[in-house]
């Protein structure tokens, strides 16, 4: 299979225009003859479903939560980038493009990123018009802040709830289409399979999570906007329900999975505090604008109260190692440095289980003495409050403890410039695709990508597909639906089987915890090496075996059954984990969010290997437990020169 | 069209609540005037009996206000009943363990307090307006002063009035502030002032109204040689 | 950090499915740590019910983000929606709140006829979605927006609008209201949009439609107890209810 990204001709700034001009249009009277399935109601899915509905297509939209308003996009705190240059500080579409490619450590596709930067300005306009209450200056114009180490102020925000407000904007647009009957919403419905007819995606199989009914839905094309799979690590900043199921089952039906090992680890999360812990909480990155990161110097007892450790016994290691950027180095760099400190036994905070202390201090004492407590409260009050609620420690008086946590997955289903996967009629948007962030995502750019895909890319490219393709009418009575339905039902029966036979001994969570914290985080997390990855690749099939023979799933298939829902997701994680580890193993370079220990500079910094790895690795399913086939899409950089990133 | 909209509004919960607020305002306005009138008892029998006579000699005023009031009471009570029905059917299965955080004794008393007030109003009218003998054997039409004195000399009648006044106090304590909220004239800037005003007004009515039976019972309002 | 653990007696509403009869069941749970979140405590209970093969099975409860923003979680703890801590969803409520005090908890679902129980502590809140569908939006097509700075909006209006927009749609306001009223939820969206210039063209039709839908769903009316504001995890003010009342009154006498 050759991977054709279908990048349009012309100079980069004209590519999207050219592509749009060449697109086939669907005449308005014909639009209502088409049905489109959108799985996911986050920024990408919600925006796409609403926009397609407005255009006159019949849309069926699915989400697993009880309401489309609760997709995990809601949790984004920091903000959304746009090259508006409202601050007159030298920003431009070109600069946002450049920063994103560089930030992604040269592993993204230039043409896609350029389009993203171009569309960023329209997103802000659209959201303002919807009534999203962005922060404003006294004069009434939109406010910006600088975010994630960017040198310009291009981030738009709504307090610490930007994702929520953007999502509610999309949700309201979606609600309007639901009200007029253009969109049918299916909440509490989980997609469990993709139906492919004659090589094209024509429908999905879902489970109604209240009644347990397995249902088939047919359409002319399918959009997957199902978010990221960071939950494979068990502990992450993702919502508990985030999963790989939708993408993975599409993968099993032939869609390629690109760069699965690219995960982003966010440096400022609240450290783990107990074995019962169910998730990690992110503290906005903006904290690093005023906080200083440190650990006790070698020889100091890490259990000493931080306020009792004198200045000269503190190691402000980010400022020491990266004097030019200091505490504002990109996420991957900050995360890795924290891990190194803790691995050296200099971490702080409690010990959980037999782990070393996993935490570093983020200290606001300097900022408080310089700006006053009130100013700090004004800037970060809600974050400090949240921290105190979780840890019962007051960050105004004692330094915060932070540690990196899995936050985002750059990997995803492979798509071309049209956001169409190698399977015809299967489009993928938002975090679920792989396209725009390379090996590391810059802060405030996932919201941008989700909305660009949903509002401004998919409505065009889906139309183009429908206009250009002759589609036979397909009903759910087609054999392909019946087969997929049977597969899904059989899988559910298998999940319930061990318990029915009295062999169920271990809970789903227990398996998930082991896979996530002991296998994936340990061997396929922030830093990886060949040996560890091989160990993981040995353990995963064993664990999967144990899972299928001893998992205890109580309750029945025909009712609301949260154990069963979880079990299905964990079963997919247990298969997908192998693809991730394999991808990580094959990519023997350090780049972006992932550090390959064998590939480092003499100073211990990440060393990228453009010679061998300047490509997208897209994996093709060949069978459970079988080694998937790797396909490569070479990446060409015409506009941004490949250089080794340096933040020193 | 505005008129159908207005009608639809009166049929909505928010509209019915607005009707309660408006009718309540009419009633508390009247209660205030009524109290000022009654306080004339301290100026002696002549003054208050003249006031009563003035009212009866000005039927337009007397009947006008009676009709408005009757309307207000009916509107208030019917809205209350209808809204109560909505609230009941909105939660047919209650909590096994319940607790409140912000609700006050006053806000919680509105419904049963309202029933107490209806009962009291009927009793009060029977006793001092219609002169039903069973409620006050010594009743004489036109002699407001002595009717009041005879009634309140009996300790349990005074007690009934005092209890009713406590309920009225609670009703006003919550209700007067609530009017501003319901009619959409409240705002964060004014909220505290409205609350204070409501409490002050409720207290004023409580003290003013209670003072009369207490003063009679304590012998502060003279009766010897005036009422037999 | 609290190192010690404690024991709890839990009374939890168990109900098989929509329309079934439910009842309070009692469970004992040992080893509760103050650093656990309330939902983690329920996780631990469920783990125990599963491994012990308890006939009742694990307790079903809604949750997703576990950081107080998605609005998915919500149970009534000892008569209080989201538990005793102000401004906090139950996923962000930590067990240290209960460490010193009664070690007996009553856990019930939101109770309102407009929110039927689906199972145990899970209720159906789609009524909220239908209220938004009735008019809780600005009718603007994708692509038809003017420049973001074309409409200046004062900082104060923007902030106040954001105060209202902070609603997470969890339903605690309904759960806590003695009348099961959805006025705080409805008013927050009405006010957010009424406070912004973008929301003006549809301002009065919006409030009428949304309130009509709210009534149709079977929620109760507002008696100004302010219970909703007191339990709201985002501390949304009842001043927005005043705004709704005002706009609805104005809408009813306007000619349009
Ligand atoms: C804590 C946190 C903070 C963040 N902060 C920022 C930030 O400040 N700026 C920024 O740019 N980015 C941020 N991000 C990243 C960003 O929020 C996400 O990448 C982005 O919102 C993803 O949007 P999405 O539409 O692709 O997916 P989501 O919003 O995750 O939506 C996924 C949708 O798919 C549905 N779904 C999933 N699986 C299934 C299934 N099997 N069947 C049916 N439906 C399914 C879900 O119900 C949901 O509706 C943050 C992420 C996190 C976790
Ligand atoms: C006749 C017997 C009465 C009954 C049955 C009654 C009942 C009620 C009820 C049930 C409420 C609603 C409470 C709520 O929604 O919180 C209410 C509100 C109110 N009542 Fe009464 N009441 C009575 C008499 C009065 C009187 C005598 C007054 C005036 C002095 C009065 C003034 C008010 C006011 C101002 C409100 C508040 C309306 C609002 O919330 O906007 N009521 N009453
Ligand atoms: S689980 Fe999202 S708010 Fe509690």
Image (spheres, coloured by chain):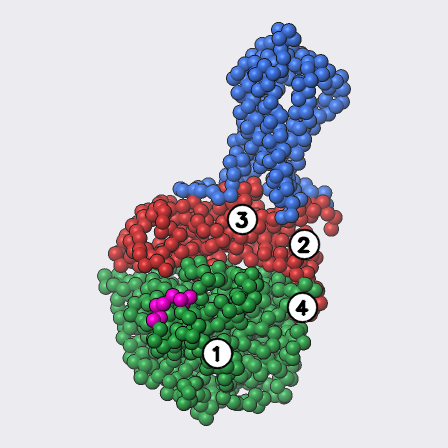
Q: Tell me whether marks 4 and 1 sit on the same chain.
A: no
- Evaluate if marks 4 and 2 touch, with contact meaning CB atoms under 8 Å apart: no
First in sequence, mark 4 or 3: give its number: 4
In the image, residue C250 sits, relative to residue A473, either above or below, namely above
Residue at image location 71% in from the left, 67% down from the top: C150
Q: Quadrant of the N terminus of chain A?
A: bottom left
For the question of whether residue A203 can be seen, the reply is no
The residue at the far left in this view is A502
**Distance in Å between CA atoms under marks 4 and 1:** 38 Å
Residue at image location 40% in from the left, 74% down from the top: A313
Residue at image location 43% in from the left, 50% down from the top: C83
The chain that hosts pointer 3 is C
Within 10 Å of disc 3 (Cα), the crowding (few <14, some 14-19, many 20+) is: many
Give the residue pinned by disc 2. Answer: C203
Q: Nearer the viewer, residue A81 or A330?
A: A330
In the image, residue B181 sits, relative to residue A119, either above or below, namely above
Give the residue pinned by disc 3. Answer: C229
Helix, strand or loop at label 2? It is helix
Q: Which residues are magenta?
A: A301-308
The chain that hosts pointer 2 is C
> For this view, does A325 lie left or right of residue C26?
right
Chain A drawing hue: green
Give the residue pinned by disc 4. Answer: C148
Give the residue pinned by disc 1. Answer: A319
Chain B drawing hue: blue
**Assess mark 2: CB under 8 A from ligand 2?**
no
Q: How many marks?
A: 4
């Amino acid at each position: 299979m050759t991977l054709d990204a279908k990048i349009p001709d012309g100079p980069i700034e004209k590519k999207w225009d050219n592509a749009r001009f060449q697109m086939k249009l669907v005449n308005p009277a014909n639009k209502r003859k088409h049905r489109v399935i959108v799985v996911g109601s986050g920024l990408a899915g919600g925006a796409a479903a609403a926009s397609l509905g407005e255009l006159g297509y019949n849309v069926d939209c699915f989400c697993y939560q009880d309401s489309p308003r609760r997709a995990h996009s809601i949790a984004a705190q920091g903000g959304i980038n746009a090259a508006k240059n409202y601050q007159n500080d030298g920003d431009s579409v070109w600069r946002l493009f450049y920063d994103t490619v560089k930030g992604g450590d040269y592993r993204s596709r230039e043409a896609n990123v350029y389009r993203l930067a171009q569309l960023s300005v329209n997103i802000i306009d659209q959201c303002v018009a919807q009534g999203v209450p962005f922060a404003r200056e006294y004069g009434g114009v939109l406010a910006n802040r600088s975010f994630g180490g960017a040198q310009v102020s291009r981030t738009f925000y709504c307090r610490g709830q930007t994702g929520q407000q953007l999502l509610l904007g999309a949700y309201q647009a979606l609600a309007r289409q639901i009200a007029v009957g253009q969109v049918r919403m299916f909440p509490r419905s989980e997609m469990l399979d993709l139906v492919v007819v004659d090589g094209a995606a024509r429908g999905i199989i879902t489970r109604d999570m209240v009644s347990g009914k397995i249902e088939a839905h047919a359409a002319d094309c399918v959009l997957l906007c199902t978010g990221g799979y960071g939950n494979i690590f068990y502990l992450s900043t993702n919502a508990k329900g985030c999963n790989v199921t939708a993408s993975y089952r599409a993968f099993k039906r032939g869609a390629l999975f690109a760069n699965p090992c690219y995960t982003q680890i966010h440096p400022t999360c609240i450290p783990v505090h107990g074995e019962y812990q169910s998730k990690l909480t992110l503290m906005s990155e903006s904290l690093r604008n005023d906080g200083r990161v440190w650990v006790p110097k070698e020889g100091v007892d890490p259990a000493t109260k931080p306020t009792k450790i004198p200045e000269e016994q503190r190691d402000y290691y980010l400022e020491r190692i990266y004097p030019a950027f200091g505490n504002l180095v990109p996420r991957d760099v900050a995360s890795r440095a924290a891990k190194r400190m803790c691995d050296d036994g200099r971490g702080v905070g409690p010990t959980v289980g037999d782990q070393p202390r996993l935490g570093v201090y983020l200290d606001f004492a300097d900022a408080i003495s310089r700006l006053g407590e009130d100013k700090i409260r004004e800037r970060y009050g809600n974050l400090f409050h949240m921290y105190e609620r979780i840890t019962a420690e007051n960050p105004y008086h004692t330094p915060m403890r932070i540690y990196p946590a899995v936050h985002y997955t750059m990997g995803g289903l492979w798509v071309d410039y049209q956001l169409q996967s190698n399977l015809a009629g299967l489009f993928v948007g938002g975090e679920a695709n792989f396209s725009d962030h390379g090996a590391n995502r810059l802060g405030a750019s996932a919201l941008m990508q989700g909305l660009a895909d949903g509002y401004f890319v998919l409505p065009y490219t889906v139309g183009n597909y429908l206009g250009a393709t002759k589609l036979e009418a397909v009903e759910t009575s087609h054999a392909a639906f019946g087969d997929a339905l049977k597969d899904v039902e059989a899988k559910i029966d298998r999940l319930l089987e061990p318990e029915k036979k009295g062999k169920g001994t271990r809970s789903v969570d227990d398996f998930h915890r082991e896979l996530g914290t002991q296998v994936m985080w340990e061997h396929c997390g922030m830093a990886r090496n060949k040996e560890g990855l091989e160990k993981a690749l040995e353990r995963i099939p064993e664990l999967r075996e144990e899972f299928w023979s001893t998992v205890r799933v109580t309750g029945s298939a025909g009712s609301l059954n949260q154990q069963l829902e979880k079990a299905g997701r964990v079963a997919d994680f247990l298969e997908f984990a192998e693809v991730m580890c394999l991808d990580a193993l094959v990519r023997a370079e350090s780049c972006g969010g992932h550090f390959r220990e064998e590939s480092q500079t003499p100073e211990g910094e990440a060393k990228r290997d453009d010679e061998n790895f300047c490509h997208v690795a897209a994996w093709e399913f060949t069978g459970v437990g079988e080694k998937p086939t790797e396909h490569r899409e070479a990446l060409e950089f015409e506009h941004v020169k490949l250089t080794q990133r340096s933040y020193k | 069209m505005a008129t159908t909209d207005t009608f639809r509004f009166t049929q909505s919960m928010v509209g019915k609540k607005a009707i309660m607020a408006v009718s309540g305002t009419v009633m508390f306005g009247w209660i205030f005037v009524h109290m000022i009138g009654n306080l004339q008892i301290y100026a002696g029998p002549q003054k208050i009996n003249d006031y009563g006579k003035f009212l009866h000699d000005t039927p337009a005023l007397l009947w006008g206000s009676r009709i408005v009031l009757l309307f207000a009471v009916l509107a208030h009570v019917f809205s209350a009943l209808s809204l109560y029905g909505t609230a009941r059917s909105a939660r047919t299965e209650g909590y096994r363990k319940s607790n409140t955080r912000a609700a006050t004794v006053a806000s919680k008393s509105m419904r049963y307090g309202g029933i107490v007030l209806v009962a009291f109003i009927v009793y009060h009218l029977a006793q001092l307006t219609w002169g039903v003998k069973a409620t006050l054997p010594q009743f004489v039409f036109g002699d407001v002063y002595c009717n009041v004195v005879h009634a309140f000399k009996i300790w349990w009648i005074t007690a009934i009035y005092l209890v009713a006044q406590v309920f009225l106090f609670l009703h006003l304590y919550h209700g007067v502030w609530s009017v501003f909220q319901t009619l959409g004239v409240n705002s964060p800037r004014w909220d505290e002032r409205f609350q204070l005003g409501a409490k002050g007004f409720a207290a004023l009515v409580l003290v003013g109204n209670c003072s009369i039976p207490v003063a009679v019972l304590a012998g502060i309002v003279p009766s010897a040689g005036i009422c037999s | 950090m609290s190192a010690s653990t404690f024991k709890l007696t839990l009374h939890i509403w168990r109900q098989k499915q929509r329309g079934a009869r439910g009842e309070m069941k009692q469970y004992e749970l040992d080893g509760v740590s103050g650093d656990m979140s309330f939902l983690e405590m329920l996780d631990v209970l469920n783990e125990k019910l599963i491994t012990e093969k308890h006939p009742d099975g694990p307790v079903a409860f809604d949750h997703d983000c576990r950081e107080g923003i998605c609005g998915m979680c919500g149970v009534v703890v000892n008569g209080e929606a989201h538990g005793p801590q102000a401004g906090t969803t139950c996923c962000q409520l930590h067990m240290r709140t209960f460490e010193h005090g009664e070690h007996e908890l009553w856990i019930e679902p939101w109770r309102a006829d407009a929110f039927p129980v689906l199972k145990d502590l899970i209720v159906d809140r789609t009524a909220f979605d239908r209220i938004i569908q009735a008019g809780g939006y600005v009718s603007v097509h994708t692509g038809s927006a003017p420049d973001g700075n074309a409409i200046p909006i004062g900082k104060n209006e923007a902030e106040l609008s954001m105060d209202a927009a902070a609603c997470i749609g969890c339903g605690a306001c309904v759960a806590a209201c003695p009348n099961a009223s959805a006025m705080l939820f409805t008013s927050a969206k009405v006010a957010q949009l009424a406070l912004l210039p973008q929301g003006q063209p549809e301002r009065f039709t919006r409030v009428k439609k949304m309130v009509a839908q709210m009534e149709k769903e079977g929620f109760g009316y507002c008696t100004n107890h302010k219970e909703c504001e007191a339990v709201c995890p985002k501390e949304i003010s009842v001043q927005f209810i005043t705004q709704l009342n005002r706009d609805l009154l104005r809408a009813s006498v306007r000619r349009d």
